[in-house]
Image (spheres, coloured by chain):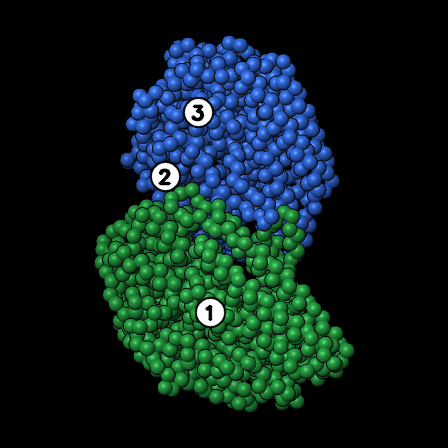
Chain colours: A blue, B green
Amino acid sequence: MTKKTLLAFLLVGASPLLPADRIGFLPASREAEDKAERVFIDTPTPDKAKIWLAALTERPHVAGTPEEKHEAEYVRDRLKEFGLDAQTVEYDVFLNHPKNVSLKLVEPVEETLSLREDPDPRDKNSGHYGMLPAYHGYAASGKAEAQVIYVNYGTHRDFERLKSLGVSVQGRIVLCRYGANFRGLKVKEAQERGAAGVLIYSDPADDGYMKGDIYPDGPMRPPSAIQRGSVQFLSLGPGDPSTPGYASVPGAKHIPREKMDGIPKIPSLPIGYGEAEKILRRLAGPRVPDEWQGGLPFAYHLGPGLAVASMDVQMEDGIGPIYDVIARIPGLVEPDSLVILGNHRDAWTPGAVDPNSGTTALLETARGLAAALKSGWKPRRTILLASWDAEEYGLVGSTEWAEDHAAEIKAKAVAYVNLDVAVTGRDLRVSGVPSLRDLVREVASSVPEPERGSTVGAAWEKRERSDWAKSGDVDLGHDEAFDLQLTPLGSGSDYTAFVDHLGVPSLDFSFTGSYGVYHSVYDNFFWMSHFGDPAFVYHQAAARFYGLLAMRLASADVVPLRFTSYARALRKELASLHKEAIRSARGLPEGDEKAGITPDFAPVEGSLGELEAAGKDLDAAVDQRLSGGGLPSSKLDDALVQVERAFLAAEGLQGRPWFQHLLVAPGLTTGYAPWPFPGLTQAVEEKDQAAYDRESRRVVGVLREGVDRLKAAAALARQP
Amino acid sequence: MTKKTLLAFLLVGASPLLPADRIGFLPASREAEDKAERVFIDTPTPDKAKIWLAALTERPHVAGTPEEKHEAEYVRDRLKEFGLDAQTVEYDVFLNHPKNVSLKLVEPVEETLSLREDPDPRDKNSGHYGMLPAYHGYAASGKAEAQVIYVNYGTHRDFERLKSLGVSVQGRIVLCRYGANFRGLKVKEAQERGAAGVLIYSDPADDGYMKGDIYPDGPMRPPSAIQRGSVQFLSLGPGDPSTPGYASVPGAKHIPREKMDGIPKIPSLPIGYGEAEKILRRLAGPRVPDEWQGGLPFAYHLGPGLAVASMDVQMEDGIGPIYDVIARIPGLVEPDSLVILGNHRDAWTPGAVDPNSGTTALLETARGLAAALKSGWKPRRTILLASWDAEEYGLVGSTEWAEDHAAEIKAKAVAYVNLDVAVTGRDLRVSGVPSLRDLVREVASSVPEPERGSTVGAAWEKRERSDWAKSGDVDLGHDEAFDLQLTPLGSGSDYTAFVDHLGVPSLDFSFTGSYGVYHSVYDNFFWMSHFGDPAFVYHQAAARFYGLLAMRLASADVVPLRFTSYARALRKELASLHKEAIRSARGLPEGDEKAGITPDFAPVEGSLGELEAAGKDLDAAVDQRLSGGGLPSSKLDDALVQVERAFLAAEGLQGRPWFQHLLVAPGLTTGYAPWPFPGLTQAVEEKDQAAYDRESRRVVGVLREGVDRLKAAAALARQP
């Protein structure tokens, strides 16, 4: 770093401290890369980010609407303007939009409940212009009028608990709060238990006043704010529900609405806590279990009671076009090898946070990469920049594209880097497969922290270490040193098809803070410029982080995947599952609950030992080869990339064959939250010893295949 | 059990299942004991309990008032009426009462804040008759007018956290919520940091609507309810603050108010959440840390802000009489050996729960014991039944009596069994020294569960097991089977002098449930008869449990203390401390916090191993001797009783010499909650390696003395 660069960094945070080494680079390649990265890193600016975000969030742009088509064109045109080769890719998919939705209380008083948010005079984007009334994507049309039962978060366990408390939801309207699991799974549980309809509200304990000041005085959710969102049964499989498991390309067979098993058959609506309070206060019946109490100022009851609600949901269903935008930066040496960056663009509302903070960062990344290309940078591999549509309905744009290009992705995709919400605050969080951890740390330590000095990597590690110190497990007799790992990937964004269906090493990241207006009209430019990132410097940081990841993935002489810590990351997750199993086996003396199983963790632990040894050996072999200045065969790249594919099983997970990765998946009953070792976790959850034994053998099988591939790669690295 | 008895048990729960064995009894003694116990157990009735409770709670009866003197006479007269030898014992102690107390908001609006509770027309005892305005016992007189700062629970850690957040309480009024530690320690922390005054309120998250329906519709705290209570610095030593460490007998030197270091020098007041909200809503400054948010429906801020409060506390200080009542049932064989049952009688309010549910049970216990005596029962040891005064100010009546009789108690007290709150619901909870665990289990399984069938012992074990299954630690590699133990004793009731100062094996128990009206005017007969124990059957169960404990302690041929599980109970506590130390040593990357120490737990663990072996051997020796029908020397009784005394150190704990027990004490910074191994815990908390090493040697020293005494007792048990 020159003195001038250092000064610039200290004064305006414009250029980062670049590390001495780069994973996967030959010593001789570093200077050119260094030069290109400097051009890249100096390109994204807060001012440009602010301009893109304002333009992208001028109007709500729900998938399937003209506004969202316009948004696609805007993004495509900007990418072209930067000098990139960008195309719109269209898929015809099943979507729905509200024709007529309404909700009222009919007993003990008749009162219409609002499905619109209150505008605030300070915020021009909080009005109703262009906003549809609140609804759930893929909601079923239908009517329900019934007594109401409160079911906490509406998780599988919550419904089981309710049953044990002697309260039935049969024929009733379920009222549950957002949080804990994916909303579609709340509706699935209610539907399976015979409920007539579902209302989902945002409790102030979860993202309202109990978590901070509320909009427009603070970033948290005000009483009228409504969380829209899809009610697809996400953990069974994302994408167009009319083409399950295959792409919605021209000529594809679309199954009819009534045969779609992955979306609800009973109506549901989202509401704010201002309206929910009117129902909740009128529930009688037993007081809720302690953990079910929310943040409204009275004791919650299970119901039923005086409250009778009436809901009417009439949706316009249909097959129509959505628009992915794909820009391609061709690779010079390995043009078929793909480094894919993706971000969705469609939003329920103006979407300043979700997803257009990410779209803004993607545009600034693209502008930076274009600048680097102009300066002479020549990436070894091809980079694709994708702007997905219809993510909000069920990761539709990315899933259809991935299914459409499954063969080439499986053969040649090096990594998929997702960016959904880029910025709600300052704290970097990264989820991903363990083989990308080292690269992430390296890149994070190359990006300046905009407001707190040092780098985003240092701030990230400090916060992770602090969280561990405060709340990490303590095991007597197990030395648990701090070990910075990526969080396992769950679902709820566009990496799902890449990692879970196709076994592509994937990442997802976000700069996070207090954010209570998710999927409401207040997720808009006012919110971002007052609370999320008023100086737009974290948008700049996100673009830098995103682009540097892409540059190193695309330019490294050997793909920068590393395997030493893979087994350690898995072992940590296995230990958590082991503890969960022990706790479950303790059972509860009350009632008829089935005792937990006592699974044998030794076989998987044994395989993890082999994986660790093979990973270490491979990393050492690659390092040695590169530091000696010798370029290994390009077969090594393929070998490294194919390690993650070893963890796939063609028959998929139990009951959800689309999910093929045996080491990580969205939780069957959580949707968002990951289940590491999903087969084992499911067996422990369902207390099924036979399933555990079967899944354990499957896991051992793919781990052994992984070990074989690591060994083969190490041999290639050592091949003269 | 005869068929008739069984039938009676099944039909009306009148007679318990008696176990085949009784700890410490010769086979030949069991029949007589069985007969006496049946007479006892059939005596307490719900009807009588209801009569006593109504009479005892007719008016508020604060220590030092004529109403409380009247209450003492009422209890004494009942005991005499039952045929027992009962006396009033008077001590002249320092107390204070409010002359004039007031609180107002002076900015941003002037508004007087209420120090009285709202009466409810359904509840005749909720009016203001005889109620003093809310105040804190032992509060300092003084005035303060200042901005307000919110400090969560006002624990040592909370104040440290506030400091790290850059907010000072110097010259300001501290507003904190009840909970987490003893209220006097909140004032102590505020005083040490230069606060001008302290307001303590009950947050609805802790015992208000977030925990259940509020009075008069439910058992939890309504907005106007105020938690009175003492602000003595309890963890430094209880009792009359004018006679620290010695009894307030005639001629004792009383130190002046200004020299009393164990009570506050700055004014404080308790308030309800209805009034607290008026201040809290007006605090500005940073938003509180997440865990500091309470249950009022807005985001809490640290302050300062617009709110300026003005408090005026004028107390009438003075030395005056308090009245313990002591009934004596002389022992036939070892009249100097004492089994002491104690319950306080004074209350801040009508006190239906605290303490007169306990007083009611004590009276029914006394009536039952009197009946057993009349039927011919002849206890081997002397039983004392104590009704303490001025517990609420600082365990004054019990502490002065214990200091007054320290020599005879230390020499001959077998056990002290405390009963403060007897009933707030159905769930038995027992705290005590581990040597009483087996007796407690045995007795609990002899008392019928009034509403759920089986015995209170079975219900207790079931609930404890369930708590463990839900929330117990899971350590991989450590097999943690469920082990029912008594909770360690902290402080906040009258066992303190007995266990912590004199080393008497002590117990405390309560039947617990939802109870949000602690120390408010709503702790009255209406509350108990609507929510706590409408049928008064748990009062009956408490009396049975209390009296059976006394009978077995007094009648057993060998005192029923057992030592096999003593070391196991301590080991569990040591493991918790070890984990706490590991967590603390992880440190936090933020700021200047001192890193935790890495203490060596091996020496204490080693001593616990010896204690376990010696305990097992002793129990086996006693069992063998008794089952052989041989009565050991009465020296064995003394030897067993003196084991607990081995754990005392004459120089006491660091900074608080009155506390002499090295294995358990109230937490220095918690007051209520126990610190097992208080010296070790303090060293870990204060991150003081030298103190840890010193305290570890002291603990090893007393444990070795305990081992020697166990061995000597075993030799006596085996002596022909």
Residues at marks 1 and 2 touching, judged by CB atoms closer than 8 Å: no
Q: Which residue is mark 2?
A: A219
Give the image location of residue A213, x and y in percent.
35, 44
CA distance separating discs 2 and 3: 36 Å
Q: Nearer the viewer, mark 2 or mark 3?
A: 3
How many marks on residues? 3
Q: Amino acid at mark 1?
A: Gly
Q: Crowdedness of circle 3 by 10 Å Cα count: few (<14), some, many (20+)?
A: few
Within the image, what quadrant is residue B236 found in? Answer: bottom left
Which quadrant is the N terminus of chain A positioned in?
top left
Which quadrant is the C terminus of chain A positioned in?
top right
For residue A601, side relative to residue B165 (left or right): right
Within the image, what quadrant is residue B335 found in? Answer: bottom right
Task: Output the chain of dot 3.
Answer: A
CA distance separating discs 1 and 2: 52 Å
Q: Which residue is mark 1?
A: B652
Task: Output the chain of dot 2.
Answer: A
Give the image location of residue B643, x and y in percent.
59, 73
Going 57% across and 60% down the picture, which residue do you hit?
B604
Residues at marks 1 and 3 touching, judged by CB atoms closer than 8 Å: no
Q: Amino acid at mark 3?
A: Pro
Element assignment for label 3: loop
For residue B459, side relative to residue A209 (left or right): right
- In the picture, the disc for residue A276 is none
Q: Crowdedness of circle 2 by 10 Å Cα count: few (<14), some, many (20+)?
A: many
Element assignment for label 1: loop
Up-down relation of residue B671 to residue A526 (above or below): below
